[in-house]
Structure formats: structure tokens, C-alpha cells
Image: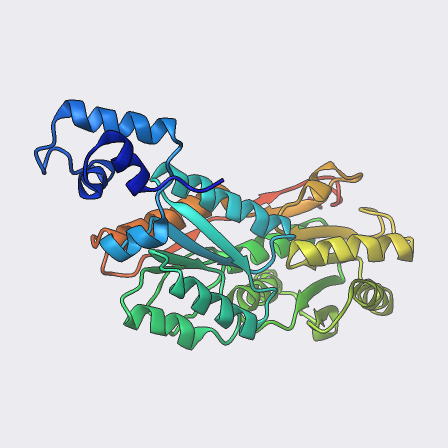
Amino acid sequence: MKAVSIKDIAGQVGVSTTTVSFVLNGKAKEKRISEELKNKILELASKLNYRPNQVARGLRTGQTHTLGLIIEDISNPFFANLAKAVEEEADKFGYTVMFCCTENNEQKASDLLHMLKHRQMDGFIITPTAGMENEVKRLGEEGRPVVLIDRYFPELETSFVTVDNFKGAFDATSKLISCGYKRIGLVTTESRLVQMQKRYEGYKAAFHHYDLKSDEKLVFKLGFDHNHDQAVKQIMEFIVREKVDAVFFTTNYLGVYGLESLRLSGKKIPDQIGVICFDDNDLFRLGTPAISVIAQPIVEIGQQAVASLLAQLKEKDKVPRKIMLEPKLLTRESLKKAVK
């Protein structure tokens, strides 16, 4: 079915397309259009289910009321829930969200950003990949509103919303130490992005805080060039080889791999091995035993990101907002009781 246009409405009402445009853009009073005619146009537009062409509107007004959201992986529960939080918050202010996934690929991220720019997004909320510094910097130089989420580039003066990753990792490792575990492994990625580096630093800092010696042999970094079966096998080999009695997974997808590795190794949680993961997941919450996590305030991250972006759009916020939220330790069945 052909989309209804302003011309169609104008023809049925018997007025010019300019008059219809003024009414639909909230300028009836300013242009001295009668209340009766305004209501007639609005009622017909509603009856015909008129939907404005956002691109055409953007050409006229400079705004499309559309935000570009670039995330890493929509199949990851963390990013799926984050996208939902952003979309729901943006909708409250009349904005539509167009989202894309980078799959942690720098070239794909660059291509997606260029595509969204050509589609005239009013602003961008981005989970950047490594190597996107120049792209993000260019957005700022072009005067395009942008907010980074989940991670940021310390060298750039850009608005961001993240959690205190250092504290989250410190709290997770401290909890394992307080439960009496001795060989506490860290399963992380080779990522050089700031959030993963802070989680590594938080893990190391906990040992220092308790006057314990950390061992680099207990740190396993999974490369990006792996498939599911390879990842499960490598994590299992690491846990067995290093005789790990507790493990901290720095992302929820690593935690899922890890649980499969532990099942294959035959290790029992929490008596033979304690488990804690950064990020929550229904699998962790509902499984048996339930897995302890460092939970991120996903809804608040989305709300703060939208608020920060809209502040830029309204030109009320020239200074970058650097927001760091508090993660929360949720202790479940995957840990032994703390040693007193």
C-alpha cells in the first residue's frame, strides 16, 4: 500500500501542502491557522495513519528525531538489554532508535557509522571497537552529538556512560579471597579496551590489598579468533592445568563458555571450584547452582546515555559528561561461605 503523503492530506482537505506541513510540525498557532482547520488536518492525518518521512523532515528541519545506536553484539544478553533500555528511554522523548552491531570488527564499525551518518541521525550512542578513536574524534569535530557506552577512550574528551570496572573486578576477586579460595584464576580477553584493562587491574589490586601474591599463570586471555568449541576446550585446559580452585570470568559470554568447560571437566561448583562472572544473565540467575555476578545497572546506563545525548542536542551541554556508575556484587550459590 502506498504511504500517505502531505500532498494526499492537502488534497482531501482542500488546502496547500504548506498549510498541512505547518500544522503537522506544530506551527499552526504561529502561522495563524484556525483551530477548526488545524483539527480537521490532524484528524484526517490520524485517520489515514500518516507517518512523516524522517529523511525529508531532516532535510527541512535539520533533525530526523532518530538516534543511531551502535553496539557490539545483539545476541549477547548484556547488549540486547542495553539496546532495549536505550530504545525505551529515547521513545519517551519522541526519538526512534536505529541500531547496528559491529561484532567487534573495526572495519564493520566504521562502515556502519558512515551509513548512519548518511541517514542523518541526530546523534550517536556507540559501544566503540578498538581503533575507533579517530572516528569518534571526527564526530566531535563535526559537531555531531555522541555518547560512548560500556567503554570509552581515556585520551578523548567525549561523553561516556560506563560502570566502575576496576571496583567491580576488585569486589569480585576480594569475595573469592574471603571465601578461602587460593588459586583464583582470571579468564578474560586479549582486548586492549579500557573496560577490560580495568577489570584486569581490579583483579590484581585485590591480591595486593590482602597482601597476597598474584600469579600471571592464573590469568588466561582468550583470543578473538576462536569458535565456541575451541574456547570451551582452551578454558577447560587452563583450569585443569593450573589447578584453579576459583575463577572470575570478565564477561558473560566467557562465563557461559566457562560453565560448559567446568561441566566437561567434572568439577563441582562451589566445593571444587568457585565461580563469579562480570555481567548477569538469566542462565546465571536460574541455573543450578546459581552463579554469583557483578551486575551492571543496564537500565540506568541506557537512561543516562540518552539524557546525555539529548542534552547535547538541545545545546545545553557543551562539556562532556563522564558518568561512571556503581556495579553490584550479587552473591549466589556458586561460592563457598566466607571464611571468618
Instruction: Determine the residue positioned at 35% across, 40% down.
Output: 94
Residue 169 lies, in percent from the top left, at 58, 57
Residue 48 lies, in percent from the top left, at 38, 30
Which one is in front, 215 or 241?
A: 241
What colour scheme has been applied to the protein in the rendered image?
Answer: rainbow
Residue occupying the far top of the picture? 36
Up/down of 325 relative to 206, above or below: above
Q: Quadrant of residue 51?
A: top left
Instruction: Determine the residue positioned at 35% across, 54% down.
Output: 55
- In the image, taking residue 338 as reference, residue 267 lies left or right, namely right
**Residue 297 appears in the figure:** no
Instruction: Determine the residue positioned at 61% across, 60% down.
Output: 210
Which one is in front, 127 or 69?
A: 69
- In the image, taking residue 319 as reference, residue 231 lies left or right, namely right
Q: Quadrant of the C terminus?
A: top right
Which one is in front, 165 or 179?
A: 165
- In the image, taking residue 315 as reference, residue 246 lies left or right, namely right
- Please state the total of marks drawn on the protein image: 0
Residue 277 lies, in percent from the top left, at 67, 52
Q: Quadrant of residue 43?
A: top left
**Residue 237 appears in the figure:** yes
Instruction: Determine the residue positioned at 28% across, 31% down.
Output: 12
